[in-house]
Image (cartoon, rainbow, N blue to C red):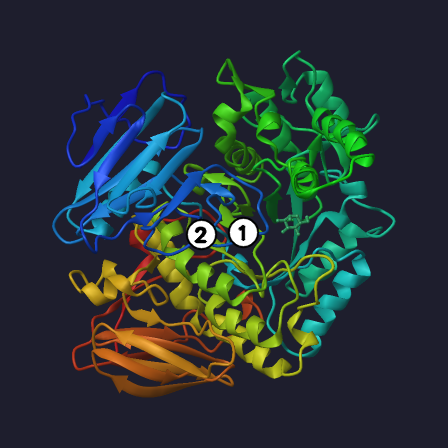
Amino acid sequence: MVKKYSFSNPIETDAVVKDIAETEWKDGVFRKEGNSFHYTLRPGEIIYGLGENVRGMNKRGWRYVSECADNPNHCEHTSSLYGAHNFIMVGDGVQKTCGLFVDTPGRVTFDAGYTDIDELCITMEDGNYKLYLIEGASYPDVVKEFRELIGRSYIAPRWAFGYGQSRWSYNTADEVREVAAEYKKRNIPIDSIYLDIDYMERYKDFTINRDTFADFEDLVKEMKEQKIHLVPIIDGGVKKEDGYDVYEEGKEKGYFCKDEDGEDFVIGVWPGKCCFPDMLNDEAREWFGDKYRILIDKGIDGFWNDMNEPAIFYSEKRLKKVFDKMEEYKTANLDVNTFFEMTDLIGTISNNPEDYASFYHNYKGKRYRHDKVHNLFGYYMTRSAAEAFERYVPEKRILLFSRASYIGMHRSGGIWQGDNMAWWSHLKMNVKMMPSLNMCGFLYTGADVGGFGADTTEDLVLRWLEFAVFTPLLRNHSARGTRRQEVYRFSHVQDFADVIGVRYQILPYIYSEYMKAALRNTMMFSPLSFIYEGDALAGQVEDQLLIGENVMIAPVCEQNASGRVVYFPERMKQLIFRKGTVAEGIVYEKGFAYVDMPMGSVNIFLREGYLFPVAKGGKCVEDVDFEDLTLYSFGEEIKPYEYYLDDGETKDFNIESHVRMLSC
Ligand code: GLC
């Protein structure tokens, strides 16, 4: 059951799609004190939710802040990542479970046993907000009800479930051709190559650098012939440059965010000085969205929206302040205090809260200071594109995912999990984040495989892929200046080809589970406790996941390990994908066991009484035969599998007509 509460004058976010009558607040399991809600945690109680954030699936024991943040150096002590997902769940997960969604575009703090280890305290910075309280029996029940409240998740085209290669940046059309050729030459499956900011003319949205991508249209065509989709990036800031049509139009029509004095607010991002289109303003949003057509008309059918927290390198005002102060330091004898004061000052140039509090939006007919609606920018940028696709190519699914997000955006596009690092701990974080994101409606998601920042290693990329072959977005991406990590650059290339190949063998299941999760508002990736209710050990497992109902995975996230200890919440059979073949491994009894999982193998644990469909594979999604399946099963009585299959391109999502039962 969902109850809705409204406090003072909430700002409408369009996160919720259901109309629900308001109830007057009365303290229950949550106690209201000022702008805070308190909940007393019982020993061992789990806290789930919060979508994209650091630490565990169980969020207990840290303080998280919902505030979209551009933070490529995030660690355990970080509080905010790129998305702001204000949904949290508490309770026993068996009889009485409670979900809470705070709908406000401003800052919210979730103190999950940080200040007081026995208490969850949720605090809104602003006193105007809506709150939805969802009571159900189990975690899956509450998630389902919440997801019905926020509407159906974005559905990506099926080709976007193939493997993608990205890098900041492929600098020329020939470099893109070379990447494609290297993959093809070695028979490594691939479906997409990503274009980062260097395809643009001096980092200007919706332009092409004709010096380096002179024959862009031909390149798109050539790649299409090779069944490779090119996916360009679009940034949140528009370069302030006389004569640049997007800037000139935005300026003339008054579509940019304004400063205190009503002038276009100017900040620095990749191209230098930029203005932010007011994504929250209906007209500006429609205008910005229409620009995507420029690339669609060139044959593009996928985009990634970036820097839309929005990221600010500097504002002119801030820079001046810092430069003036630097003059003083120039002649000072810098001691322990002044030296660190100086270095700290430099750190305040980017993404400064004062800058976020000094520009304005025109949102639903009212003027709002940016910090009050901060978490909506990336959401509305992505919505601008999604709405334009709906107007322009209504029949066709277009790939779209964003860096920043708020709940509600899950209907318009997916997300990637922002700039991570080539760290084993970030692989682990990727595993833990998948169910948290699913709870909040984000299904089309994945992390930068191999790690974005820092130099990666061959084993990390391979182990990461062994996990990522299960995630809807499967993209190898890395930052400028780091070690190259296209898989053909490593020593054991065949291992990579084999592991990526597994994605194409298991795609019928992955796609079917994704579609069912989207159409039925259920989880694709679940923590073990969602199925093994009441199993206290299952509730403590942070690095194993269920995919759909039928299988469990236990990725290896430690360097130099050739296997790992796995918790089996019931009897399961191991399926080993290696060198293009599938072998049925041993049956593990309920309990703990060490499982050998050598590098280059993908391991799936099949539940007793369930089956798992496997295709022959292919070199791209189009090649995969979704009908010619081998059904692996384990046990005496096998539950038929509800297999969802559609054309993968159009929007005919009717579940009844696309589901059929597969039985052994
Ligand atoms: C941001 C993005 C990253 C991209 C880079 C250059 O850091 O998160 O993915 O490569 O910008 O565009």
Find residue 334 and report its image quarter. Answer: top right
- Inter-mark Cα distance, 1 to 2: 8 Å
- Pick the front one: 414 or 221: 414
Query: In the picture shown, does residue 613 fall above or below 293?
Result: below
Where residue 618 sits: x, y (%)?
54, 74
Q: Which mark is residue 54?
A: 2
- Mark 1 vs 2: CB contact within 8 A: yes
What residue is drawn where x is 56% and y is 34%? Answer: 381
Query: In the picture shown, does residue 448 fall above or below 260?
Result: below
- In the rendered image, which residue does mark 1 sit on? 74
Which quadrant does the N terminus fall into? top left
Where residue 130 sits: x, y (%)?
32, 26
Q: Is residue 407 visible to us here?
A: yes
- Pick the front one: 589 or 66: 66
Label 2 environment density (alpha carbons within 10 Å; few <14, some 14–19, many ≥20): many
Find residue 539 and report its image quarter. Answer: bottom left
- Pick the front one: 652 or 347: 347
Secondary structure found at label 1: loop
What residue is drawn where x is 32% and y is 25%? Answer: 35
Q: Which sits earlier in the primary sequence, circle 1 or circle 2? A: 2
Where residue 183 sits: x, y (%)?
67, 72
Position of residue 74 in the picture relative to residue 492 (left or right): left
Where residue 192 sits: x, y (%)?
62, 60
Which amino acid type is marked by label 1? His
